[in-house]
């Protein structure tokens, strides 16, 4: 069982092709029997290798699920730490505003109140804005459901062609 599944699959395919070319006379009976025996051997070995590979797949999926759960936990922890840091920054700013303090020497840190950079903050009521300030966007969307139904019915739609579906395996 040292050959790979791929090699055994190709060997099995070659034997099946050879089996199609053999006549059904008495001389070829032993050859047919030997080929069928080899096909059975290949099938058993392919099934055994597939079972082993499925075990590895299950193990890898389990490990990936564990890692994904750990990633989500770390993301939640990082987000909670960021929110806590932001709350503390807001707390210092609030206290500095209440006491009208502009600058604090806090141990190894210098804390000072500053105006936010950037453009003027705007509150927009869209109903009253003149048209010269409005940018209109046009987006083209396609009715995919209708296109799929028409293509399925055999309707030829210019610019659209059906693509062949791929295959996958399901492991239960």
Image (tube, helix red, strand yellow):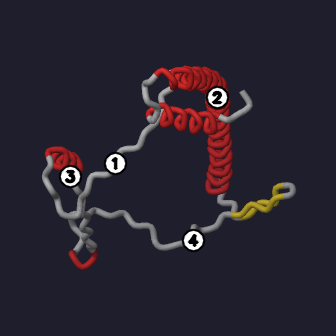
User: 115 or 102: which is nearer to us?
Assistant: 115
Q: Is residue 74 above or below residue 33?
A: below
Q: Is residue 66 visible?
A: no
For the residues marked 4 and 1, what is the alpha-carbon distance in whole angstroms? 54 Å
Circle nearer the viewer, 3 or 4 = 3
For the residues marked 3 and 4, what is the alpha-carbon distance in whole angstroms? 44 Å
**Point 57% across, 71% down: residue:** 117
Circle on res. 164: 1
SS for callout 2: helix
Residue that numbered label 3 is attached to: 143
Circle nearer the N terminus (2, 3): 2
Circle nearer the viewer, 4 or 1 = 1
Circle nearer the viewer, 1 or 3 = 1
Residue that numbered label 2 is attached to: 53
Circle nearer the N terminus (1, 2): 2
SS for callout 4: loop
Circle on res. 117: 4
Circle nearer the N terminus (2, 4): 2
Measuring from the top left, give residue 71's x and y in whole percent. Answer: 65, 38
**Point 59% across, 68% down: residue:** 115
Tell which residue pokes out farthest to the bottom in this image. 132
Circle nearer the viewer, 2 or 4 = 2
**Dot 3, how many residues are within 10 Å of its Cα: few (below 14), some (14-19), or many (20+)?**
few
């Amino acid at each position: 069982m040292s050959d790979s599944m791929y090699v055994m699959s190709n060997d099995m395919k070659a034997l099946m092709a050879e089996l199609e070319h053999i006549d059904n006379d008495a001389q070829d009976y032993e050859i047919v029997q030997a080929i069928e025996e080899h096909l059975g051997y290949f099938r058993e070995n392919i099934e055994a290798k597939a079972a082993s590979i499925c075990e590895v797949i299950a193990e890898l999926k389990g490990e990936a699920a564990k890692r994904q759960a750990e990633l989500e936990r770390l993301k939640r922890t990082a987000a909670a730490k960021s929110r806590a840091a932001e709350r503390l920054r807001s707390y210092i700013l609030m206290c500095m505003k209440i006491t009208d303090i502009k600058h604090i020497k806090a141990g190894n840190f210098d804390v000072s109140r500053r105006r936010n950079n950037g453009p003027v903050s705007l509150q927009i009521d869209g109903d009253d804005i003149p048209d010269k300030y409005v940018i209109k966007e046009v987006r083209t969307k396609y009715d995919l459901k209708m296109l799929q139904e028409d293509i399925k019915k055999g309707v030829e739609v210019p610019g659209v062609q059906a693509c062949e579906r791929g295959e996958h395996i399901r492991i239960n």
